[in-house]
Amino acid sequence: MKTIILILLLFLGTFEANAQSFQKLKLGKQTFELHNVTGAIINFKGKKVLKIERDLTAIPFDANRLESTVDEPHYAKLVDLEDFENGTIEIKMYSQIQNPSPYLPAAGFIGLYFRIAEEDKAFESIYLRPKVGRVNNQMARNHAVQYFSYPHAKFQTLRDKYPAGSYEGSAPVALNEWITMRIEVNGETAEMFINNMKYSSFIVNKMLGTTKKGSIGLYVDIATIGYFKDLKVIKKALRDTHSGEKINDI
């Protein structure tokens, strides 16, 4: 009996340690849980912000295996919001390249995850490559915005299986400046607006994930330093563009 009790206590202790293994940081009224990123709350350009960078120890990066080692669950999760399905997500973010950079082609990958399933099993994402947003090359600009669905439809899979431009696009963004990204999620579609522009820069006509609701996260990838502030979320009913429940606003 004593042996059974001891095993049970050890199991419960291990479960509790695993449940509390994510570092949490509080910014204003919001708490973020760090998943495979390092982070801190710092003063940046006169405001308190969440700074995160991908943790390469937690998820190693291999430049020869991009498809399998990027666009993974490396993000800061907004705590206490697990049922986002449709509505608006808005974030202000600022992207820098690490110096020295562990990956020279890095483009300042930064953006949002949404509808994140339990245990990070699946999610949708729209993110930016700010380094190419204003270059004097249209083909490069066309890769400034990326949609993907984890785990089965990451960027290279989408490029290989769908016509060019189906899940990528252009946006007037750049490194080393604040970018306001707003995503309107409605059923299988998502529309992205940049810097309070009246018209969207990018539309996902059909998202590819099977998870219909979940959490929201702030994303960075290889060689990127990301700064985030003023996250706002409004949950809405499907196709309802007039009313919504505003939550988790700073």
Image (spheres, rainbow, N blue to C red):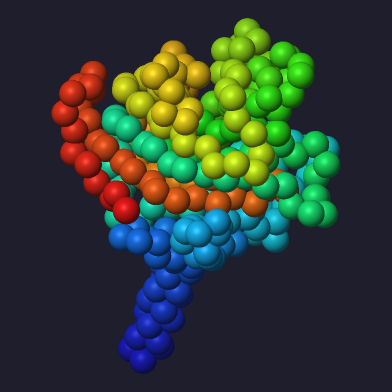
Which residue lies at the image location 55% right of the left edge and 56% below the top edge? Answer: 45
Which residue lies at the image location 28% right of the left edge and 50% below the top edge? Answer: 248
- Name the one closer to the observer, 99 or 205: 99
Q: Quadrant of residue 15?
A: bottom left
How many numbered tags mark residues here?
Answer: 0
Quadrant assignment for the N terminus: bottom left
Q: Is residue 106 left or right of residue 114?
A: right
Which residue lies at the image location 82% right of the left edge and 54% below the top edge? Answer: 100
Q: Is residue 150 left or right of residue 97?
A: left
Which residue lies at the image location 19% right of the left edge and 33% below the top edge? Answer: 244
Q: Is residue 228 left or right of residue 247?
A: right
Q: Is residue 239 above or below residue 126?
A: above
Q: Is residue 216 above or below residue 1?
A: above
Q: Quadrant of residue 37?
A: bottom right
- Name the one closer to the observer, 179 or 26: 179
Q: Is residue 29 left or right of residue 92?
A: left
Query: Where is residue 82 drawn, in percent x and y?
Result: 31, 47
Is residue 135 in sight in this rendering?
yes
Query: Where is residue 128 drawn, in percent x and y?
Result: 59, 32
Furthest residue to the bottom? 2
Q: Quadrant of residue 71?
A: top right
Is residue 119 in sight in this rendering?
no
Query: Where is residue 250 drawn, in percent x and y?
Result: 32, 53
